[in-house]
Amino acid sequence: MVGRLPECRIDLKARLESGGPRKLLAIDGGGIRGILSLKILEEIERLLIKASNRADYRLADYFDYVAGTSTGGIIAAGISIGMPVKKILDFYLNNGAAMFDKASIIRRLQYQYKREPLAQKLKEVFGEDTTLGAPELETLLLLVMRNATTDSPWAISNNPFAKYNDTRHEACNLRFPLWQLVRASTAAPTYFPPEVIDCCGKPFVFVDGGITMYNNPAFQMFLMATVDRYWVHAPVKSRGWKTGVDHMLIVSIGTGTSAGENYSLRPDEMNLIFNATAIPSALMYAALNEQDALCRIFGDCVAGPLIDRELDNLIPSSGPLDKKLFRYVRYNAELTQEGLAALGCGNIEPTRVQKLDSIEALDDLQRIGGAVAEQRLNLENFNLNVFRP
């Protein structure tokens, strides 16, 4: 992925002005486990290449909107600029050990922000001067991060019709360097120092979007694609995309999940240190499931694993509205002994692949993602097989 960006093949403005069904893709956060997601995405791209009869077909050709949080932000940005999934996967395999090396946090804190190793890699990938509003982005792109300065989540996109994407606005978001926004979204505490971004002469400190409610950004992406307030500078009739199962598809890709079960836990063990380490992951897990459940309730879910024993997989389900707002597909893996066995990966030790920095388990993560793709992926579930010339 190092070197020049691929030549822009799709004009975003023309794409936004075109009609037809809209296809949206969301990718969860999850550190090095993004490799699992990439194996699923690689197979989706392969099937789309076959169905379109175009060897140069990319996910950016099919999906109109791509969203990602944390490691999903790296993948989403790569897809948005037209990268083939294989190149993004190679980037992870070649640089994953350096990118997610938790032991190097002390050393990382000694770097100046723009010279930190991950920042250097992202500048090489996306270009130091490529901005969020650059023409190299072929899709709408949503990146999630947390603004620690204002104590608020930032879900930022390149939608040219958004309020703070007006080029006449002093604080136009489209001027931010793309690499820096991706770096901010991936700034996981204890792994990377925060990212400082200058906005109108004021420094704002950003950290990983995974510690917001949008570690799975699927439903937030749906809202930003359809709610008129996110399209305030568009013509009135074009403020938000049309909903309905025949008009919108959302594909959501996970990085693997595993509940932190501990049946030997005693109340007296739940001290300050325990809570400091357990609560963030518990909140991230709950938020991820909540976004998934909302998509299945308001959308027509045609593929997806179990959510919990009460809701099951919500296939099919009826919700608070008379009609479903979109077709929904969810692919993920349960990284427990039982879940891995169901995928034919029962000889993989769960603890090897559950951590965000499982850099010694790159082959295992590829195998798990490949198994999900082989057993569960069916392009017919997408239904909206509209290919662009």
Image (cartoon, helix red, strand yellow):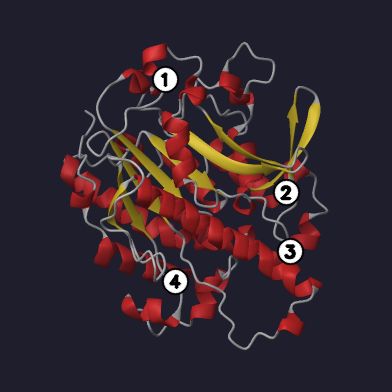
Where residue 184 appears, x then y in whole percent? 66, 43
Whole-angstrom CA distance, mark 1 to mark 3, is 46 Å
Secondary structure type for disc 2: loop
Relative side of 326 to 180, left or right: left
Disc marking residue 239: 1
Please name the residue shown 68% across and 65% down the image: 279
The amino acid at mark 4 is Asp
Label 2 vs 3, first from the N-terminus? 3
The amino acid at mark 1 is Arg
Q: Is residue 265 above or below residue 207?
A: below
Callout 2 touching callout 4 (CB < 8 Å): no
The amino acid at mark 3 is Ser
Label 3 vs 4, first from the N-terminus? 3
The residue wearing badge 3 is 104
Q: Nearer the viewer, residue 284 or 185?
A: 284
Q: Nearer the viewer, mark 1 or mark 4?
A: 1
Residue 227 in which image quadrant: top left
- Circle 4 residues within 10 Å: few <14, some 14–19, many ≥20: few
Q: Nearer the viewer, mark 2 or mark 1?
A: 1
Secondary structure type for disc 4: helix
Relative side of 216 to 25, left or right: right
Label 2 vs 1, first from the N-terminus? 2
Q: Nearer the viewer, mark 1 or mark 3?
A: 1
Please name the residue shown 46% across and 39% down the image: 221
Secondary structure type for disc 1: loop
The residue wearing badge 2 is 116
Q: Is residue 178 above or below residue 214?
A: above
Where residue 248 appears, x then y in whole percent? 30, 36
Please name the residue shown 39% across and 48% down the image: 295
Whole-angstrom CA distance, mark 3 to mark 4, is 22 Å
Disc marking residue 363: 4
